[in-house]
Image: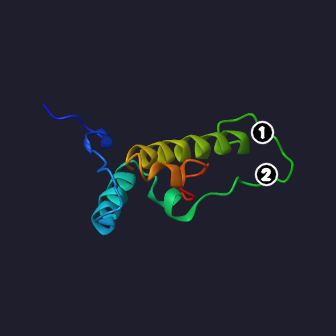
Amino acid sequence: MTRSGGSDLRAPIFNGENYEFWKIRMRTIFKSHGIWDLVEKGFQIPYSKGKKVDDAGSSDSEKGALLMKDAKALGIIQGAVSDDIFPRISNEETSKGA
C-alpha cells in the first residue's frame, strides 16, 4: 500500500558535496509540500492596516499559517544537512535564510 502526500520523499543529507543533486531533490520535496515559493522568496507578514479580524482569513491567522509553513521548511532543511554543515545554518530563523 502506498501512502499519499509528500511524506514519502526523503531528503538527502547534504555533506558539502554534490550540491546540485541535493538542490534538485530539495526543490522537489518543497514543491510536494506546497512550500517551495516560501523557501525561494521568503515571506513578509501581511499588512492589515491596523484591522484585527477574528475570522480564519484574518492577518493573525495568515501570519500563523506562514510561520508554520516556514517552520516546516526550516525543519526539513535542518534535517537534510550533515552535522558538519548544520552549524552554518543553526542561527537562521527562516527557511530562506537557511
The residue shown at (28%, 65%) is 18
Q: Nearer the viewer, residue 30 or 34?
A: 30
Q: Please tell me whether mark 1 sits on a helix, a strand or a loop.
A: loop
Q: Residues within 10 Å of mark 1 (few under 14, many from 20)?
A: few
Callout 1 amino acid: Val
Which circle marks residue 53 in the picture? 1
Residue topped by disc 2: 48
Q: Position of residue 63 (x, y in %)?
A: 67, 45
Looking at the rendered structure, the number of numbered marks drawn on it comes to 2
The residue shown at (34%, 51%) is 32
Callout 2 touching callout 1 (CB < 8 Å)? yes
Q: Nearer the viewer, residue 37 or 56?
A: 37
The residue shown at (27%, 64%) is 21
Q: Farthest front residue?
A: 84
Relative horizontal placement of residue 10, taking residue 83 as reference (left or right): left
Image quadrant holding the N terminus, namely top left
Q: Position of residue 5 (x, y in %)?
A: 30, 40
Is residue 83 depicted above or below 97 in this figure?
above
Relative horizontal placement of residue 93, taking residue 55 as reference (left or right): left
Q: Nearer the viewer, residue 24 or 7?
A: 24
Is residue 16 depicted above or below 9 in this figure?
below
Relative horizontal placement of residue 52, taking residue 20 as reference (left or right): right
Callout 2 amino acid: Ser
The residue shown at (59%, 51%) is 94
Rounded to the nearest angstrom, the CA distance separating label 2 from label 1 is: 9 Å
Q: Please tell me whether mark 2 sits on a helix, a strand or a loop.
A: loop
Q: Nearer the viewer, residue 87 or 4?
A: 87
